[in-house]
Image (cartoon, rainbow, N blue to C red):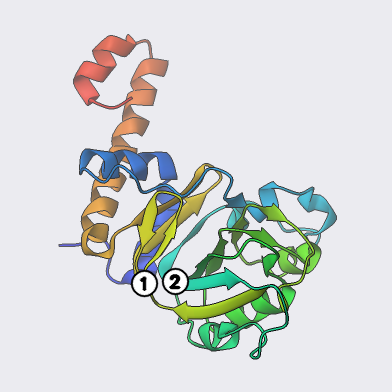
Amino acid sequence: MAMWKDENEMFALIKEKLYTPVVGDILDQMGYNHQFLPAPIRPLVSQVPYHDYIPEGETQNNRLKVAGYAMTVLENDVFQQPKKPFGYMTEALDDLKPNEIYVATGAHNSALWGELLTASAKARGAVGAILDGYVRDTPKVLEQNFPVFCNGTWAQDSSIRTYVFDWRCPIEIGQVTIHDGDLIFGDIDGVLVIPKEICEEVIERALQKAATEKTMRKAVEGGMLVTEAFAKFGVL
């Protein structure tokens, strides 16, 4: 029986109790050894002086973690104004569902995300965006309190350079194949993909490991030797 009553509670537990290193360890133990997206894909808010852009009284914490189901988007570079500007980007945005994350790859000649895309995704109930590429309109994205992970910022427009030609299809980012509906979890240490068919087991085992790590830390801080603690708790 799951440790949560519904998916909203599951995602709340993930963001409150887990961190990508412990989830990655569980995936390794289960034989899924290539689930982290490339290291440059990091929270947008960690790449800029966020105090300049986030309203007074808010923090960056809720922008440093993201958890949801992948809504995969496949793009490609184009080199002149296409017959259909942006391709099927608007259709993909309109198809977003609550608890989904817009996950895009395939185009690298321009920014893949910006202010209006953020507003559109939030309006559909999405919980974040993961871009294998760049973001623009950075201040206007950050002020919307929406987790965005990317390779960096770049103002170059996508309308004449990028074409969305499919969505909810398998995509690859780095060494990871991502299917629509896979669980995505990201924090300051990176972004990983949990295949949907094993996500419940992975999360339950990760929650258990996180609790064990907390216990081991207390033991070491209390004077137990590391070798003894590792033998007892089995984590490091």
Q: Earlier in the sequence, mark 1 or mark 2?
A: 2
Specify the farthest residue to the front: 79
State the image quarter where residue 200 is shown. Answer: bottom left
Q: Quadrant of the C terminus?
A: top left
For the residues labelled 1 and 2, the Cα–Cα distance comes to 5 Å
Q: Crowdedness of circle 2 by 10 Å Cα count: few (<14), some, many (20+)?
A: many
**Above or below — where is 7 with respect to 207?**
below
- Determine the secondary structure under disc 1: loop
Q: Is residue 4 among the parts visible in the rendering?
A: yes
- The residue under the point 43% across, 55% down is 185
Q: Amino acid at mark 1?
A: Asp
According to the image, label 1 marks what residue?
Answer: 180
What percent of the width, then of the height, locates residue 195? 29, 60
Left or right, 99 with reference to 139: left
Whether label 1 touches label 2, CB < 8 Å: yes
Q: Quadrant of the N terminus?
A: bottom left
Q: Closest to the observer: 232 or 111?
A: 111
Q: Amino acid at mark 2?
A: Thr
Left or right, 80 with reference to 223: right
Q: Closest to the observer: 159 or 22?
A: 159
According to the image, label 2 marks what residue?
Answer: 72
Q: Is residue 3 among the parts visible in the rendering?
A: no
**Above or below — where is 135 with respect to 161?**
above
